[in-house]
């Protein structure tokens, strides 16, 4: 990874759909599905207590911003459903932002306020802001899943135009 590239980690339901949508954004260099925010080291799909299915995004800050990534994140999932997206339910499918710095935390807090004030959702945002710890890459068959399995299940779509 080039030293000027940055990383962002988001959870918003099943990681397949998030990856499929984020990978196409200008400035996104790469994506990995995986697990974060949980109790065990080296989690697997069968054993990831407390971990969220998450997406780690490597991006070029000269081509896009953390704020732009937040904007897209809040446009492609329902941030008002606690521990659920579509048919998927449980803490693995929570809406969460795993911030790496106080600056990212502040930007995320401001964006949550913006989404709440927008009136686009009937209920308030329940997205949690969690300090980033470790990210564990998911099994190979979970990487690029929808690219490799066209027509596979996803609970993600672009619901709204930009909040910005």
Image (cartoon, rainbow, N blue to C red):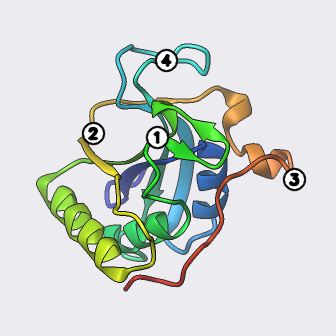
Sooner in the amino-acid sequence: mark 1 or mark 4: 4
Point out the tag, 2 or 1, that comes first from the N-terminus.
1
Q: Residue at x 37, y 59 (%)?
A: 5
Q: Which mark is residue 83?
A: 1
Q: Nearer the viewer, mark 1 or mark 4?
A: 1
**Disc ID at residue 132:** 2
The image's mark for residue 43 is 4
Callout 3: helix, strand or loop?
Answer: loop
Q: Earlier in the sequence, mark 3 or mark 4?
A: 4
Label 1: how many residues lie within 10 Å, few (<14), some (14-19) or many (20+)?
many
Residue 151 marker: 3
**Residue density around tag 3, few if under 14, some if 14–19, many if 20 or more, within 10 Å:** few
- Closer to the camera, 63 or 142? 142
Report the residue at 39% width, 14% height from top: 41
Q: What kind of element bears circle 4?
A: loop
Considering every residue shown, the one lying at the far left of the view is 102
Q: Nearer the viewer, mark 1 or mark 3?
A: 1
In the image: residue 102, left or right of residue 73: left
Q: Is residue 133 above or below residue 9?
A: above
Q: Is residue 159 left or right of residue 70?
A: right
Residue 113 relative to residue 12: left or right? left
Helix, strand or loop under label 1: loop
- Disc 2: CA contacts within 10 A as few (<14), some (14-19) or many (>=20): some
* Label 1 – label 4 distance at C-alpha: 19 Å
Spatial CA span between label 1 and label 3: 24 Å
Observer-side mark, 3 or 4, equals 3
**As drawn, which residue projects farthest toward the front?**
122
Q: Quadrant of the C terminus?
A: bottom left
């Amino acid at each position: 990874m080039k030293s000027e590239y940055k990383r962002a980690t988001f959870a918003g339901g099943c990681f397949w759909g998030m990856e499929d949508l984020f990978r196409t954004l200008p400035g996104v260099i790469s994506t990995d599905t995986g697990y974060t925010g949980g109790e065990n080291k080296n989690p697997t799909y069968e054993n990831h207590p407390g971990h969220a299915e998450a997406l780690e995004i490597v991006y070029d800050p000269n081509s896009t911003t953390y704020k732009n990534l937040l904007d897209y994140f809040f446009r492609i999932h329902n941030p008002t459903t606690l521990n659920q997206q579509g048919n998927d339910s449980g803490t693995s499918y929570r809406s969460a932002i795993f911030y790496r710095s106080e600056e990212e935390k502040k930007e995320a807090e401001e964006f949550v306020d913006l989404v709440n004030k927008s009136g686009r959702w009937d209920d308030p945002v329940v997205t949690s802001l969690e300090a980033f710890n470790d990210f564990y890459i998911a099994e190979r068959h979970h990487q690029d899943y929808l690219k490799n399995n066209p027509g596979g299940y996803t609970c993600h779509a672009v619901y709204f135009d930009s909040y910005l």
